[in-house]
Image (cartoon, grey):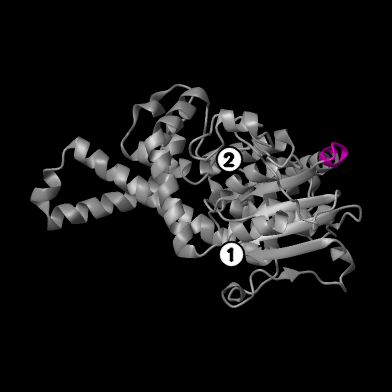
């Protein structure tokens, strides 16, 4: 993904005024970073990461984070910001981006927002409801409540204080249920009521020209790229990276960092092979085994059925063979989860550019979209591409 900057003679696009803000949105493994490096080499851009995984220090392989050498040559804002134990809200992201955009423009640069966290892009383009950040004390209180009584008790209470969120959320959605209760306990106002308040989007800034490029490559091509990237992650030592994180930090399975695709599947694998890392005194072993308890039970049932149907084969498996099977299962699940992530990213992209679900298959994907009758879209140019080459043509 490295690009030579020797003998550069770029002719930059007249589409981009000095007050431009460029969003390069695309699903995972689609080649965003390579184009971002090429653009940075022109000397006209600063890079701002829009990736909810790259914010974590020491999470390098599983996030496909640029190497230290690459980060030295191509500096990124909003990378390696916090430890895996910490949290970073969407509101904090928006605040940081607002500051960075101003800083880039003051430096005579165009901010290039590049990444695949579509929720972040939606917050920038559509705006955020004025939901207050969680108080650390309230967050601790709700987490203790969850550990003592389980997420079902919190979900039941949410039904009493916020029926709208209760109906909207899945009963097992720990992150959003706890967040909704944190907001209610802190403000005495339900999060659904907060979310009905007017939004304000950064992209509506009348002093800026926003260019939103949505790159949606063909699925078979992307799936092949995803498989290749995962193969590289396994060979570079993703499992060892996760073990190292568990050694270094008092992690729990419900932390946002540990819900990242890839890391989640490795944690499940380590639990299933009873890895000794969970005996570390700073880790709560029960939390990890509880997190994958339902999976364990389904696997145990399947194992029992297999033993009944194939007793000689099942009994002949050694511990090493069982571990190999668990490893293969981990890799298969990571591949599936990454493909599902890409599918969700396509859905978000359609939502961002306001296309129906089937439109991307029939629309002219290189057309520009801009509603001149909408005063909030005074300087918001949206472009759909199927390849990074099309995005490159627009930006150069």
> Relative to residue 245, is residue 207 drawn left or right?
right
Residue marked by disc 1: 386
Q: Which is nearer the eye, 290 or 356?
A: 356
Can residue 130 be seen here?
Answer: no
Residue 265 is situated, as x and y percent measured from the top left of the image, at 42, 44
Q: Is residue 278 magenta?
A: no
Residue 328 is situated, as x and y percent measured from the top left of the image, at 30, 46
> Relative to residue 97, is residue 170 drawn left or right?
left
Q: Residue furthest bottom?
A: 362
- The magenta stretch is 103-108
Q: Residue furthest left?
A: 312
Q: Residue furthest top?
A: 281
Residue 35 is situated, as x and y percent measured from the top left of the image, at 62, 48
Residue 17 is situated, as x and y percent measured from the top left of the image, at 85, 53
Q: Secondary structure at mark 1?
A: loop
> What is the crowding at mark 2: few (fewer than 14 residues within 10 Å), some, or many (at least 20)?
few
Choose the circle earlier in sequence order: 1 or 2. 2
Q: Secondary structure at mark 2?
A: loop
Can residue 281 be seen here?
Answer: yes
Residue at horizontal 68%, vertical 45%?
39
Residue marked by disc 2: 3
Residue at horizontal 55%, vertical 32%?
67
> Relative to residue 135, is residue 246 drawn left or right?
left
Q: Which is nearer the eye, 88 or 154?
A: 88
Camera-nearest label, 1 or 2: 2
Q: Magenta span: helix, strand or loop, mainly?
A: helix
């Amino acid at each position: 993904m490295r690009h030579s900057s020797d003998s550069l003679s770029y002719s930059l696009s007249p589409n981009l005024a000095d007050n431009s803000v460029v969003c390069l949105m695309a699903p995972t493994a689609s080649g965003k970073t390579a184009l971002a490096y090429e653009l940075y080499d022109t000397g006209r851009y600063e890079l701002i990461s829009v990736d909810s995984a790259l914010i974590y220090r020491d999470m390098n392989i599983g996030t496909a984070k640029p190497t230290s050498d690459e980060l030295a040559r191509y500096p990124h804002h909003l990378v390696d910001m916090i430890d895996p134990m910490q949290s970073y809200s969407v509101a904090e992201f928006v605040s940081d981006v607002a500051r960075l955009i101003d800083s880039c423009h003051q430096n005579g640069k165009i901010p290039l927002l590049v990444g695949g966290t579509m929720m972040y892009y939606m917050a920038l383009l559509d705006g955020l409801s004025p939901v207050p950040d969680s108080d650390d004390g309230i967050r601790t209180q709700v987490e203790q409540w969850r550990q003592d009584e389980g997420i079902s008790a919190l979900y039941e209470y949410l039904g009493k204080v916020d029926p709208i969120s209760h109906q909207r959320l899945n009963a097992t959605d720990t992150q959003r249920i706890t967040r909704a209760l944190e907001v209610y306990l802190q403000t005495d106002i339900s999060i659904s009521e907060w979310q009905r308040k007017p939004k304000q989007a950064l992209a509506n800034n009348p002093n800026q020209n926003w260019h939103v490029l949505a790159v949606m490559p063909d699925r078979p091509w992307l799936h092949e790229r995803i498989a290749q990237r995962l193969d590289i992650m396994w060979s570079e030592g993703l499992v060892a990276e996760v073990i190292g994180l568990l050694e270094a930090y008092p992690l729990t399975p419900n932390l946002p960092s540990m819900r990242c695709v890839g890391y989640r599947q490795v944690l499940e694998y380590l639990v299933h092979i009873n890895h000794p890392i969970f005996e570390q005194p700073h880790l709560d072993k029960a939390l990890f085994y509880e997190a994958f308890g339902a999976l364990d039970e389904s696997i145990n049932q399947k194992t029992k059925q297999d033993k009944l149907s194939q007793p000689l084969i099942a009994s002949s498996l050694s511990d090493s063979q069982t571990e190999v099977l668990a490893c293969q299962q981990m890799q298969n699940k990571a591949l599936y989860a990454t493909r599902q992530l890409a599918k969700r990213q396509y859905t978000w992209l359609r939502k961002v550019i306001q296309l129906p679900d089937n439109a991307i298959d029939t629309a002219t994907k290189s057309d520009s979209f801009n509603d001149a009758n909408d005063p909030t879209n005074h300087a918001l140019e949206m472009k759909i591409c199927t390849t990074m080459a099309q995005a490159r043509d627009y930006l150069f």
